[in-house]
Amino acid sequence: MATLFIQTLLTLLLLLLTPGWGSAAAAAGGGGSGERKALLRFKAAVASDPGGLLRGWSPASPDHCVWPGVSCGGSGEVVALNVSSSPGRRLAGGLSPAVAALRGLRVLALPSHAFSGQLPAAIWSLRRLLVLDLSGNRLQGEIPATLACAGLQTLDLSYNQLNGSVPASLGALSGLRRLSLASNRLGGAIPDELGGAGCRSLQYLDLSGNLLVGGIPRSLGNCSKLEALLLSSNLLDDIIPPEIGRLRNLRALDVSRNSLSGSVPAELGGCVELSALAGFRSSSFVLGTDLTSYHSFSQNNFTGAMTSLPLAVDKLGMQGSYAFLADGNNIAGQLQPDLFSKCNSSRGYVVDISNNLITGGIPVEIGSLCGSLVVLGVAGFEGELAGTSTKGYG
Ligand SMILES: *[C@@H]1O[C@H](CO)[C@@H](O)[C@H](O)[C@H]1NC(C)=O
Ligand SMILES: *[C@@H]1O[C@H](CO)[C@@H](O)[C@H](O)[C@H]1NC(C)=O
Ligand SMILES: *[C@@H]1O[C@H](CO)[C@@H](O)[C@H](O)[C@H]1NC(C)=O
Ligand SMILES: *[C@@H]1O[C@H](CO)[C@@H](O)[C@H](O)[C@H]1NC(C)=O
Ligand SMILES: *[C@@H]1O[C@H](CO)[C@@H](O)[C@H](O)[C@H]1NC(C)=O
């Protein structure tokens, strides 16, 4: 009797010590019970799950690879943790460092939930990670100076509460296509290294809504695939470096709400590449027009006269619409009809140069010259306005 009892105990102990006990996935190899435990610890740190998104994550359910939001690779290791949210169905609570035990993770995507507290530093040690999207949570902490996740293609931590600085090491991630750290509390300068050898894949860079100081690095002119450079609402000063004009694929440039000075560069985005500008937010601008391309210099300290708009007409063609926003600067002089000479080359044309030091009124011809003019913002003109047929706003 006693022997049988001890044998049973030993068998139980062995079972408990065997990796993968209780996990069907473990039979296929991979992380097995360690990964299952890590997922359950992730769930345990979630304080609130009103949509029942993790309801299926039950210790009673034998295969964690079928849990909603979990994907496993061929050898049974968890490769993606991707839990979508929707209004009223957001996870809240802490983000458990246990996710870093999922060593095979390629995708960690938990956008627009309500995770709060520290962004676990251990996440940066996930070497296989390709997509890290924790945007729209309430995470705090800093992005460390050294990153092991060298293969990252998408890093989106926008709309959180991160502080510290933008680490230079991000410039070494040579596969990075999309980097968004918008709307955090990041300070310091934009590191020159961001435009280093690593930026050759970079298509989308959004650092708007932070506390960044200093100039726009000239080196960003090296990022030849860049389509969107969004730096609005920071504390940037100095001029716009001419190297930005080398970015032939740039379709969206937003440097509004900074303290930039000098004159608005005459030719930016030497070529305006065209295709749908899906997903690009157009700063504070909401119009019935889909913008194909826009340049926003609003609310800075730009000076000088406006002689032409930084638009490459040949590429814009009739397919697209274009917005040039430069309201709230110190741009002076008179408006020349030439300024609008390119306006027929787009489907919709938005120009906002209100609240500057422009004198002399609006050339009467504009209304007839410019069939595509959708909006012309000219509030705050110094001096008298000539009678026009343009549609003003603001
Ligand atoms: C995450 O899942 C959603 C919905 O299933 C999908 O649309 C999205 O592409 C996935 N994200 C990643 C990075 O795989
Ligand atoms: C970041 O915020 C934390 C508090 O959340 C603070 O302790 C830390 O000093 C801040 N770091 C920087 C660089 O401001
Ligand atoms: C990037 O641009 C800067 C300044 O424009 C230049 O000095 C540097 O050599 C370039 N770096 C690479 C890796 O091309
Ligand atoms: C704008 O430029 C003027 C003249 O150079 C300077 O006195 C002023 O402080 C600047 N303002 C900002 C907000 O940078
Ligand atoms: C734009 O088109 C209108 C009507 O089609 C024409 O009258 C006007 O001269 C054109 N403007 C320019 C600048 O070519």
Image (cartoon, rainbow, N blue to C red):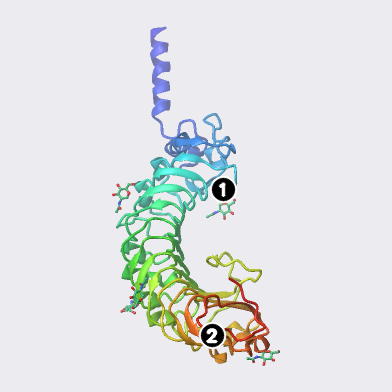
Q: Amino acid at mark 2?
A: Ala
Give 60 or 152, whichever is nearer the viewer. Answer: 152
Disc 2 marks which residue? 312
Q: Residue at 47% x, 74% y: name it.
A: 297
Mark nearer the N terminus (2 vs 1): 1
Q: Is residue 293 left or right of residue 139?
A: right
Q: Residue at 39% x, 42% y: name it.
A: 97
Quadrant including the N terminus: top left
Q: What mark, if any, has residue 296 been given in the picture?
A: none
In this view, the mark in front (2 or 1): 2
Give 283 or 120, whichever is nearer the viewer. Answer: 283
Q: Is residue 307 above or below residue 173?
A: below
Residue 241 image point, x, y percent? 37, 79
Q: Amino acid at mark 1?
A: Ser
Q: Is residue 22 above or below residue 322?
A: above
Residue 257 image point, x, y percent? 44, 68
